Image (spheres, rainbow, N blue to C red):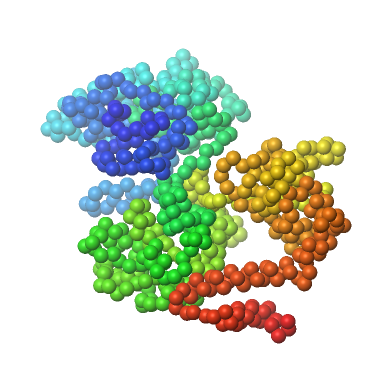
Amino acid sequence: MADLNEHATTTHCQNVVDVFKGISSAEVNRPSSGNEEGDFSLCCYNGKVELPDVRQPDDTYLELFHGDSSMSKYFLKNFRRFNSMFSFTSMGGKIDHSINKGNAPYTFRLSGENYHCLGSLLPLQGSKPQFSQLYIYDTENEVSNRQGVFGKYIFLDIDNKAKNDELEMHIINYLKKMLDSNNHLVQVYRMVRYCFEENPQLDLKLRIIGTRQHDGRQYNLPSSSEVAALIVGDIGDAVDNRDIIVTKQSGSLKRISELHPSYTPLQYPLFHPFGEDNYPVNILHKNVSSSSTTAHKKVKLDAMIKLVNDKSLFGKVQAVIYMIEFQKRGLPHSHICIFMHPCSKIHNPQDVDKFISAEIPNKDSDPDLYKLVSDHMIHGPCGDANPKSVDSQGFPVYKRRDNGQYVVKSDIMMDNRTIVPYNMTLLKQFQAHINIKWCNQDGSIKYLFRYINKGPDQATISLVQNNNGDNPDPTLDEIKAFYDCRYVSVCKATWRIFSFDVHYRIPFVMRLAFHLPGEQQAIYGANEDIEDILNKTTNASSMFTGWFECNKNHDIAKTLTYAEFPTKYVWKKQLRKWEPRLRGFAIGRVHAVPPAFDEAYYLRILLNKVRGPECFEDIRTVDGVVCETFQDACYKRGLLDNDNEYIEAIEEAIYLDLILFRKALGNCLILNEEQLKNLALLEIENFLNSNNSSLRRY
């Protein structure tokens, strides 16, 4: 309950950032939104959520937290006990009591999930009131009841018990009056007490409403009628699944939803003396409807992508793609693949050494880097140092000299053979485990894309019935005892809640659909009339036919093929039309079609050659003559004579393989054109042999 002016604040919502003493100024001022100004924005979604100002209690209450009087010291020493006296809910969970044995310090161990429970309005006959029941039952002795419910207090003066009792009673009386005057949750329970005083036989239920009618940005404290409702008799069906229904006298505990806005104020009334709401579900964004979502950026990851892409850490970049992998054993991993521009490609071992290091730095010349490498970039011992630039599989072998540098980990001397390849600039700036590798063959890239399509984490669990001896031979249904579940870790849940990117790519790749004449997709309902379906604008105009219409109206469009079109134009799905691109960049990829689809396959071939058609006939037109089929147009253009299309595809694949092979060899092996040709033929022969064929057949 400190003054807001004593703490760091955010740029947008001015909420408290540092509420605990002892946090260093470096932690407070560290940027958390990827910018360089040190602004914090996660709490308010970069200003999208406008939170109300925190209401300050009176000076007397603040004096209990910050004062130097005997009452303040006593209050702080017994704060948990005082909060429990006035708490509405009790904490639930599977607590392990067996660990506290002997003279060791007390340890609180909770297994599984922590939750809060709320009891009935009145205790059972003969039972003592507890928690929220103390606001209703036997209020004439409320102070002594609250004092007697909980255990021993911590003495301020061990030799003066009367003084401790006096302070205790004084503080309880003050807190009771303060909450009665300010806390609207307490006031609701007092209303229930008045109802029972007038009619003890009344069958009354209390409904603590989970959905507020007013926006929390404008109303700091909701009205009592919005928070709770007193219901006599049956509740009915008009109850939200997060509403808390408190019955009159059930003798059982009810678990309350963690998403209820009063979840925290019910458990910690001394931290919420006004009973103000916690962060509610579906809070509206400023000037944004509740259905809108905001993609919130990460911190270190986005900063690193900006450093690599915008500031050209490794050179000019053509494309960046990454995906987030959530493992069951720790924090999420980011797998990043950077596609370099041809002018910045790595061609020799010297280029690799310029960006990637796999050695322990000198401790005297660069102690900071030495500590970072020892903390983040060491794994278990691996094979002997290898002076070659690539291994037998074509993967690069990084320079690991025996220069006498070592790091001691777990009493074991670790030399350069145990260093994970890293980049010095990235390691110094982000101080994290960042493994840098040179992708010199397509197998390395496939490793990354495998994570994109692997699907969510799964877990198989078994449910075992606890056998206490009542049934020594229970019947076990092995099918029902096992469940194949989707595993959602805490990290993944948090990542999804804050709308962080799981898959990311630069530039944007747009998939371009196409179809034969009159075969575009049509979306319709089960009972729609066929005429209405055909007259729908969304069915009449497709992305492909929209390309034709754009070519009629724009001269620049006539110079582009279908695959090149997204570089200059943007498809507006709501308007069902292409419009000129004002910013950004995108790459077009036409849907792949196998040869078995006949005309669709030949149409796709033509789409990579024809520029600016205004109809399907223009695509089939060659030298002013309209061909009958797309296949005939391909033949007339010479695209299918002598299998040119297949030969071009094979030559392109061979050319790429030769480039990758040359890069893998580096400066260790030089081959002439004839040797490269024989090597390529050998690879083709091996591939054909694996498919029960051979070059001798051709």
Please name whichever residue, 549 or 416, is drawn nearer the observer in this view of the structure: 549
Residue visible at 70% across and 71% down in the picture: 647
**Where does the image place residue 197, in percent across and percent down from the top left?**
44, 16
Q: Quadrant of the N terminus?
A: top left
Q: Judge left or right: residue 73 versus residue 473.
A: left
Q: Is residue 20 above or below residue 220?
A: below
In the depicted structure, whether residue 95 falls above or below residue 676: above
Q: x and y percent of residue 379 in the render?
A: 36, 66
Q: Position of residue 646 (x, y in %)?
A: 72, 69
Tell which residue pokes out farthest to the right in this image: 628
Tell which residue pokes out farthest to the front in this image.
Answer: 623
Q: How many marks?
A: 0
**Can residue 200 be seen?**
no
Q: Residue at x 44, y 76 (%)?
A: 667
- In this rendered view, identify the residue nearer to me: 487 or 404: 404
The quarter of the picture where the C terminus appears is bottom right
Q: Is residue 585 visible?
A: yes
Q: Residue furthest bottom?
A: 696
Q: Residue at x 80, y 51 (%)?
A: 618
**Identity of the residue drawn at 32% across and 31% down:** 83
Residue 245 falls left or right of residue 580: left
* Outermost residue, left side: 159
